[in-house]
Image (cartoon, rainbow, N blue to C red):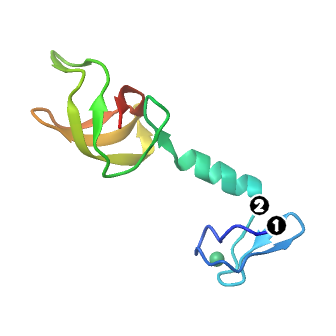
Amino acid sequence: MSLPACPACQENHTYSDGHLYVCPMCFHEWTDESQRLAEEALIIRDANGNALNTGDDVTVIRDLKLGKDVIRQGTRVKNIRLLEHLVDGHDIEAKVDGFGSLYLKSSVVKK
Ligand SMILES: [Zn+2]
């Protein structure tokens, strides 16, 4: 059985100690469950369920009201930045032509 690489230092010298995985390189200890949860929490998905990354270009999938302006469906948004912590329910920050820097929701964009 092959053991997962260390999530802390990426070295491949993991051994298992009961229900724990242990990395002898940096002494990080973790479990399958904690690793899975950590990875799940970090993944931000677009409207189609594709994982998004900082630096991606996305397209807005529906009109978004912004005060009296509207960001039109189909607007291309380049070089998004994923937020580590939600801001008002928004998980993406990006510059949109004509609007400047905005917060967006991953549920209204697609890659
Ligand atoms: Zn390690």
Query: Which secondary structure, mark 2?
Result: loop
**Real-space Cα distance between discs 1 and 2?**
5 Å
Closer to the camera in the image, 17 or 83: 17
Please state if 79 lies on the left or on the right of 111 as rendered.
left
Contact, CB < 8 Å: mark 1 with mark 2? yes
Count neighbours of disc 1 (C-alpha within 10 A) and say few if under 14, some if 14 to 19, many if 20 or more. Answer: few
Above/below status of 9 relative to 69:
below
The residue positioned 30% from the left and 42% from the top of the image is: 93
Q: Residue most toward the bottom? A: 25
The picture places residue 106, in percent across and down from the top left corner, at: 40, 34
Count neighbours of disc 2 (C-alpha within 10 A) and say few if under 14, some if 14 to 19, many if 20 or more. Answer: some
**Between discs 1 and 2, the one toward the N terminus:** 1
Please state if 99 lies on the left or on the right of 56 as rendered.
left
The picture places residue 66, in percent across and down from the top left corner, at: 22, 21
Above/below status of 42 relative to 47:
below
Q: Quadrant of ligand 1?
A: bottom right
The residue positioned 72% from the left and 83% from the top of the image is: 24
Q: Quadrant of residue 29?
A: bottom right
Judging by the rendered image, the residue that carries numbered circle 2 is: 31
Residue 20: mark in rendering = 1
Closer to the camera in the image, 92 or 47: 47
Q: Residue most toward the right? A: 18
Above/below status of 99 relative to 79:
above
